[in-house]
């Protein structure tokens, strides 16, 4: 696949995400729309009214705009595993060129309560059937779904090994401007944001204990009144990757699958899934690190149900500091 073709795909996915953003802004402006109403519950996740609005916009856009020359398989929340959705419609999977994994709204709860930005996430991979995994993604795009009081929506995209395209969209003037993206260059965690995800009550004590032990071993626990590392539980994997990209956070990670397994809890709906982390490539393009807690590359299949544990670091120095300690602590606690 030529880079020129992938660049066309990147621009096309940016247009799709712009359409989704504008659709939701319009829906939010209409009186009577209740984004927080539960529309359905699937094996992968809870589907809210805001998800339903988005899915309808996506299917309509693909039917109208996706080029026939690049048949694609669509994988996303709302499409059950085993249900083949392709564009052009009814194209056999074996004849598709791409597999597109899609999270229409990552951070639904943030958006439906107008609390914090959510994100649209897409990862386009060359089709390898069931063998297609996160490492096969060659185009990634993420677009911010801002709260009602915000005037700006950020969008970051890339073709693999071609660098980032980062822009900010003014929601009032509808004009684009360049966005500066640079992960933190700090070589330590002092006075910075870094945390392990513990979004829900399940497993919170175990996850907190692992993180507390991590900071103890690094030498920051209790130092300066315990105020040297700041915690920010941003309930969206895409949002966490953005925080690393933009330089706000130095380390973020999610080891819930291990914790839930230790506690005998189901991880089907409570964990990160491949569609949540399909924009990991963007952090790598910016010079950051994203990997499994064991330090290995993420190679999960592009489906909607596989639970994923991951760690993200702003730079190599921070990754080297945490990686061996975290691997041992997970082994000891989980």
Image (spheres, grey):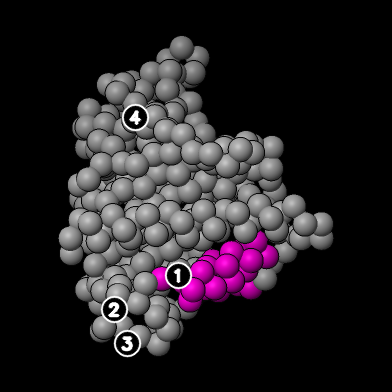
Residue 195 pos. (x, y %): 43, 35
Q: From the image, tell me which residue sits under label 4.
A: 182
**Residue 277 visible somewhere in the drawing:** no
Q: Are marks 2 and 1 in contact (CB under 8 Å)?
A: no
Query: Which is more N-terminal, label 4 or label 1?
Result: 1
Q: Are marks 3 and 2 in contact (CB under 8 Å)?
A: yes
Nearer mark to the viewer, of 1 and 4: 1
Closer to the camera in the image, 145 or 255: 145
Q: From the image, tell me which residue sits under label 2.
A: 96
Residue 82 included in the magenta stretch of the image: no
Nearer mark to the viewer, of 2 and 4: 2
Dividing the picture into quadrants, the one containing residue 219 is top left
Q: Are marks 3 and 1 in contact (CB under 8 Å)?
A: no
Query: Which is more N-terminal, label 4 or label 2?
Result: 2
Q: Are marks 1 and 4 in contact (CB under 8 Å)?
A: no
What SS does tag 2 mark? loop
């Amino acid at each position: 696949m030529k880079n020129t073709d992938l660049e066309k795909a990147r621009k096309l996915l940016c247009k799709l995400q712009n359409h989704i953003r504008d659709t939701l802004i319009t829906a939010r402006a209409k009186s009577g729309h209740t984004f927080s109403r539960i529309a359905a519950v699937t094996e992968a996740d809870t589907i809210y009214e805001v998800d339903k609005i988005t899915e309808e916009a996506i299917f309509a856009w693909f039917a109208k705009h996706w080029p026939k020359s690049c048949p694609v398989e669509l994988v996303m929340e709302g499409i059950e595993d085993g249900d083949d959705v392709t564009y052009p419609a009814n194209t056999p999977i074996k004849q598709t060129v791409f597999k597109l994994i899609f999270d229409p709204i990552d951070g639904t709860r943030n958006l439906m309560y107008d609390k914090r930005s959510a994100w649209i996430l897409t990862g386009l991979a060359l089709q390898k059937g069931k063998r297609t995994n996160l490492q096969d993604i060659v185009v990634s795009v993420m677009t911010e779904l801002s709260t009602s009081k915000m005037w700006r929506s950020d969008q970051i995209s890339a073709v693999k090994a071609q660098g980032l395209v980062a822009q900010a969209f003014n929601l009032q003037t509808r004009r684009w401007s360049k966005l500066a993206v640079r992960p933190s260059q700090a070589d330590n965690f002092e006075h910075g944001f870094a945390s392990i995800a513990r979004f829900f009550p399940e497993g919170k004590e175990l996850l907190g204990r692992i993180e507390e032990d991590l900071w103890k071993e690094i030498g920051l626990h209790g130092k300066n009144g315990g105020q040297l590392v700041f915690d920010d539980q941003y309930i969206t994997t895409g949002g966490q990757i953005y925080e690393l990209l933009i330089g706000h956070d130095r380390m973020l990670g999610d080891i819930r699958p291990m914790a839930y397994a230790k506690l005998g809890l189901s991880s089907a709906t409570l964990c990160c899934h491949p569609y949540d982390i399909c924009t990991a490539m963007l952090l790598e393009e910016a010079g950051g690190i994203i990997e499994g807690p064991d330090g290995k590359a993420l190679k999960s299949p592009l489906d909607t149900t596989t639970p994923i544990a991951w760690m993200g670091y702003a730079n190599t120095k921070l990754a080297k500091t945490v990686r061996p300690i975290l691997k041992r602590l997970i082994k000891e606690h989980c």
